[in-house]
Amino acid sequence: MRLLALSGVTLLASLAFAGPLPQAVGIPGKPAQDQCTACHQALDEPRLQQPALQAAEDIHHRQGITCAGCHGGDPTSEDPEVAMDPKKGFVGKIPPQKVPEVCGSCHSDAAFMLRYAPNIPTDQLAQYKTSKHGLALAKGDGRVATCASCHGAHGVLPPSDARSPVYPSRIVETCARCHGDAALMKQYGIAGTEIEEYKQSVHYQALTVKNDLSAPTCNDCHGSHGATPPGVSSVSNVCGTCHLTQREAFDLSPHKDAFAAMEQPACEACHSNHKVLPPQDQWIGVGEGQVCGSCHAAGDKGAEVAQALFQALTGTVERMERVRQRVEQAERRGMLMDEAAVKLEEAHQALVLARNEVHTVNPQRVGAKTDEAQAVLAKAEKDAEAAEAELRFRHNGLKVSLVVILLAVVALGLKIREIERRS
Amino acid sequence: MKLTEKLWQALDERYDLKPLLDFAREKAVPRHRHDWMYYFGGLTLFFFCVQVATGILLLLYYRPTAEAAFESVQFIMTRVPFGWLIRSIHSWSANLMIASAFIHMFTVYFAGAYVKPRELTWWTGAALLLLALGFGFSGYLLPWNELAFFATRVGTDMVSKVPFIGHWLLRVLRGGEDVTGATLTRFFGIHVAVLPMISTFLILLHLAFIQRQGMHEPAEEPKLPPRPFFPNFVLREFMVWLVGLALLAALAAFFPWELGKKADPFAPAPAGIKPEWYFLFMFETLKLLPAKVLGIEGEILGLAAFSAGGLFWFLAPVWDKKRARGEKSVFALLVGWGVVLYIASFTALSYLGVFQ
């Protein structure tokens, strides 16, 4: 065993960063035991002490991989001279340019990674090399993000850990460390306002308010390791990954070819890219602040279609609100309105589909769905009317009984007076 | 001979009913300027009877489990013919019964009717009022709605302040550490079995004492010829009951009792949790007290003060010697008006939102 270890060390000394160090790899699932953390924890200088303190939480350390896995050296020796001997592969602090290769030495090795997680992807390094970050790094720009910039260097946590900087709800803050710095971004021709815009979006709201971890954050549209801005032609593909029905509807619209001819991004034209606000029916039209007005003007065919779509939707919304109020009022007054509530939900579903059909900009298709909603609303309205009639009947009945009781009181009073007068 | 006369004769032969009839004919009720107050005890009894009748009808459909309670009340109010009316009347009648009982108690107090020989009537009456409050507190939870759930959590929490046995009492009352389905089942049992049984017994005792001793007549009132119990007083009492019924019908018609939202034990307590109006004065007082007074928890001190005050009120026949001698007692009057003003003002101010 010792002979094997020694030959391994010699080999690694010549092949720095080429692969995992045998001495540095323990039993998967069993936390690593090494002298590096023991000595460094006792150091006074925080810069040298911190990595050792973070080791206990580190995913690598917990899987038996010691500090030597990345930094080389002899993790078994108590003598610093021996432990950090360059002859034993010790490389000390890893420069940013080398970080992807060091991480990739294990993470790109499918056979090695299989020991820890059979389903873990091993193409991160290949993807990184195609990313804006990777391309800039290859040109020698040491300021761009590498693996450690997002995942951390020490105390690396799995992305499923809510404390990890790459946990879905924390990614935006991680990206913001660089992309929120307008001065830095200016040097790369990036506005630097993307983070603030994204934070106003429905996506960020879903992620942080509803805690919906499936809501898109930076990496869902730009890619994680292969991070790059989607080109004009692929924006609709990116949005269409989640918004399938909207994309299918858009593909049926005359806008598809027109936008392609103008080399305009599809979804982004109306919804913006980062600042994706909750869509409003009021956006449809050529008036001030309405999205169709970017290309169409009052009086043209597009403006007419927009007006038809707007009326179909808002007419349905107004009626739905009226019916909902009546149903809720009847419910508050003690009537069972479950069936009407189901109908209101049905109408709402039809309205959602109508809003989806807006992407076809076809008034017939939108009208078919709003007609469906209106038909169900008419039934719900009948339920509300029936409930109101029942309530009126109850009130009137009780008023009548009240009158009868009061008449009986008066009659009794007269009787008592008569009795008392007689006696 | 008429059929009714025959029937009467047959019953009289067997049960010797004539003395009872003679007693009813001769029975009279004192008449004076304040004799209106005699009707409130009867009115309270009327509302109690309404509670029993409507309560039995509600029992046909009500299911006392956390899973089904809310839905069963909803079913009663929406699907059962006239279920909405029965439930609304049950809720309103409960409130009117307590209001009527309070008025009855204060009129008895101010008339000084609790002094010897009517001490036991006063004490059984006071116990009945406490039972009525128990009915209100236990019944409030039964629809298992949001407000009731959290109000019960706050209400039962007060029990834990009792020194030494507080925590044990809390567990007994709640059937566990928190308000759960076990609490609902307990409260249901208390509401429909334990309290009605004790109340019925005490009501009979209370009525027997009044029957045996007759109505109290205030000494200072000018004497008028008494009013025959039957039919004059009975008809008048019946008229008051009809007015009570009219009030119930009006309230049920114009302010139907709402069902609220189903209780969700995991949801945060909604803002503005308040108990029923008859507990408001205590609730607001306890809220006003500082957290610590001389090193003792404010709430404990408050509850101790309420207990002492209640006991003092209960023992009025013992400490009020002046009235027992037929003299006026300024102290007793001051105590009475102090209590009335305190309860009325705190309840009114709470409704006006002054304490928020």
Image (cartoon, coloured by chain):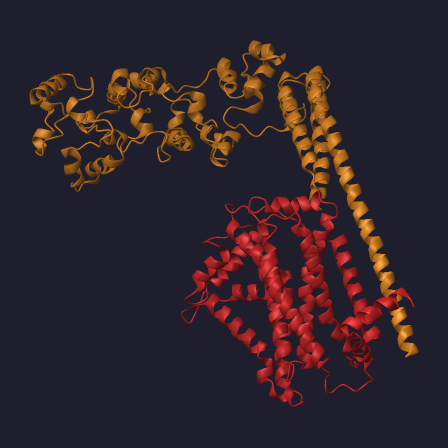
On screen, residue A354 above or below B137: above
Q: Please indicate whether residue A362 sits to the left or right of residue B299 in the image.
A: right
* Quarter the N terminus of chain B occupies: bottom right
On screen, residue A389 above or below B196: above
Residue at image point 72% right, 52% down? B86
Residue at image point 51% right, 72% down? B305
Residue B154 position in % (x across, y down): 52, 57
Q: Please indicate whether residue B338 sits to the left or right of residue B228 in the image.
A: left
Residue at image point 50% right, 37% down? A209
Q: Quick check: can you spot residue A147? A: yes
Residue B46 position in % (x across, y down): 73, 65
Q: Quick check: can you spot residue A101? A: no
Residue B129 position in % (x across, y down): 62, 69
Q: In this view of the protein, which residue sits in the foreground, A67 or B179?
A: B179
Colour of the chain lettered A: orange
Looking at the rendered structure, the number of numbered marks drawn on it comes to 0
Q: In this view of the protein, which residue sits in the foreground, A23 or B99?
A: B99
Q: In this view of the protein, which residue sits in the foreground, B38 or A87?
A: B38
Colour of the chain lettered B: red
